[in-house]
Amino acid sequence: MTDLLTTGATRLPVESDAALERIHRLESLLGDPDDPDNPLGLRAVLDADERGELLPEGERALARFGLGAEFVPAALGGRFERADRFALLMRSLFRRDCSLGIGHGITSFIAGLPVWADGSAEQRRRVAELLCGGGRVVAAYTELDHGSDFARVSLAARPAPGGYLLDGGKQLVNNIGRAEAAVLFARTDDRPGSRGHSHLLIDLEGLPTGRAGRSYRYATSGVRGCLLGGIGFEDCPVPADTLLGQEGGAMETVLKVFQVTRCVLPGVVVGVGDTQLRTVLAFAGERRLYGGPVSALPLSRSVLTDAFVDLLICDALSMVAARSLHLLPEEASVRSAAVKYLVPKLLQDNSYRLGVLLGARSYVRQGPYAGFQKAARDLPVVALAHASEAVCLSNIVPQLPRLAERAWRPALDRARDAPAAPETLFRLHDPLPELDFSRLELTTHGADSLTGVLPALADELAREAAHRPEVAELAALAAAFTDELADLARRAGSLSPRDRTLVAGRPAFLLAERYALLLAVAACLGVWRAAGTRDPFLADPLWATAALRRLAERLGPRRDPQPEPVVEALFEELDGRRRDALTFDLFRTGLATRAVPAKGVDR
Ligand SMILES: Cc1cc2nc3c(=O)[nH]c(=O)nc-3n(C[C@H](O)[C@H](O)[C@H](O)COP(=O)(O)OP(=O)(O)OC[C@H]3O[C@@H](n4cnc5c(N)ncnc54)[C@H](O)[C@@H]3O)c2cc1C
């Protein structure tokens, strides 16, 4: 294969990265979104949404592509090798249609994880074969009676001759009505405590008649095509070999493998933000007010460039989080919660601001900008799925005091043994070791080598600023964020005993939120620092400084807008990418749009 993949600065020979080649292939398969005759184009996607169905041509195309194999580790015959590349692949699909992204499979990815982590060789083989062959396995966790309170999940799996008897139900489970298998989170012990639940891998097609029903569909406001359904069991026998992992071990497994999904999903959802920004940018260039395009109005230009900078922040944080699953898995418990909290939040804030800019067309369900309203409806649903903002922050809160003591204070004291992330964490094209599920931990035990890079980088930048005026503001911002970290460490250390638990009060949640913002600062600085010469835009302090300014605005100490020359430079980059059909993320990858296909996809 001699195809080349266009990125902003360089043309990467795709043989060097098979995953990038597949992303390119998927993008080509999805084709031009603006072509009304494209069966996978935006028109078809919107029509399917209006009908409340998953685009049938889309499902067929993804089956031909073999999307299911992307969810299966390479060691088991699939194509999953790197969490960061997987997020980029799914991002392509989410740029086009969230419903297809969720409906055709990302929940199969979620369901596969406990199997890869805990399953027997036979269970792994079966699920790998099922997914590689185009089948589905669903993750059945939710009970509307209990929501995120997993410890109270009540669907019972009672011991019975030859296996278990299932009693109870699950709701809001994606694809439950048409999947071949399910990973079921069930109560196997009535005693209180964390060892009351087990995972069962059940064959949905082999259930005895009359003992299980799975027909109900929940209609949703966003991702309308998705088939969220329910299942109910009544004294339903399943064999003993359905048990996945150890009896009583499901809670621990869930808390570990959800770290993987929480690191990956935000990187996927960046695609929705890209589509929204692309739509509104096109509108702002075409719509004329007061004798010029809307994009010439300074306020509009700021909204557009702020959304661009926030997308870069989201990408830096989600890529670093995904890469850290491979490089620093023992630290993932807190990082995964932070990225799953912050990225959807930034995207949703921009969805609102871009919607205001788009005006009436932000809610009109037809015409050239109708993709926006669908994305704006899909985004909050997708952001809520799996773990809400509050749930993510509540996972960070109990870990704050130990992080302050063991990671932040040594880093702030410039202690020789202070943990600092390896540079490869930030080099987005560097190879990664295999993801080792056995290295995931329930807590980080106070380790946080990502935030640890902040004081060290601030020192480096301060020295550099003396002879490089273009990094002076970045250095000043890095120093201000280092002071923020010191303040956070002080406050985290003095949290009351109640504020160190899941039922903590608002002040503790605010600290967790500030921590997530500081992680984003460290990720942006790290990615900028490690960019090298491959992509001049990424190596330019322009975007990193703009990113830190945006984050400073959120943290509170500074509320300065971006200076006008910065807005102009960012707008030029943004609009250039639109014209050249390149993504708005850190990768500047070619898109298959009609406007300039030869530039976007080089053959
Ligand atoms: C598109 C989509 C697909 C889905 N697919 C699946 C699937 O395939 N399988 C599946 O099992 N489920 C699935 N779900 C369900 C999803 O996982 C649930 O929406 C989720 O578990 C939240 O449950 P809940 O809304 O009942 O929230 P609840 O837990 O009832 O939360 C209520 C409120 O309390 C807040 N809250 C919760 N805990 C805390 C805390 N500790 N501190 C402070 N506030 C807190 C929440 O943020 C929320 O505001 C899907 C959902 C969606 C939207």
Image: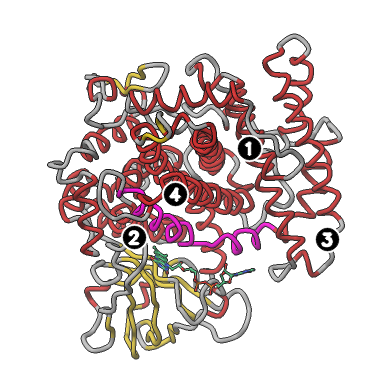
Q: Where 386 sits versus 87, above or below?
A: below
Percent coordinates x, y for residue 602 in the rendering: 25, 20
In three-dimensional space, the C-alpha distance between marks 2 and 1, rounded to whole angstroms, equals 30 Å
Which kind of residue does numbered mark 1 sit on? Arg
The picture quadrant where one finds residue 328 is: top right
Residue marked by disc 1:
550
Mark 4 / mark 1, whichever is N-terminal? 4
Task: Give the number of the disc on residue 355.
Answer: 4
Q: Residue sitting at 44 percent across and 71 percent down?
A: 141
Which kind of residue does numbered mark 3 sit on? Leu
Percent coordinates x, y for residue 162 in the rendering: 35, 83
Task: Give the number of the disc on residue 495.
Answer: 3
Q: Are marks 2 and 1 in contact (CB under 8 Å)?
A: no
Seen from the viewer's position, the closer of residues 37 and 256 is: 37
Percent coordinates x, y for residue 302 in the rendering: 54, 34
* Mark 2 residue's CB less than 8 Å from ligand 1: yes
Q: Where 50 sits versus 540, above or below?
A: below
Which kind of residue does numbered mark 2 sit on? Val
In three-dimensional space, the C-alpha distance between marks 4 and 1, rounded to whole angstroms, equals 19 Å
Mark 4 / mark 2, whichever is N-terminal? 2
User: Does the rendering let one see residue 323?
Assistant: no
Seen from the viewer's position, the closer of residues 504 and 361 is: 361
**What kind of element bears circle 1?**
helix
Q: Where 197 sits versus 340, above or below?
A: below
Q: Are marks 4 and 1 in contact (CB under 8 Å)?
A: no
**What kind of element bears circle 4?**
helix
Q: Is residue 523 magenta?
A: no
Q: Residue sitting at 48 percent across and 26 percent down?
A: 571
The part of the chain drawn in magenta is 370-396
The picture quadrant where one finds residue 109 is: bottom left
Image quarter (top left, top right, bottom left or bottom right) of the N terminus:
top left
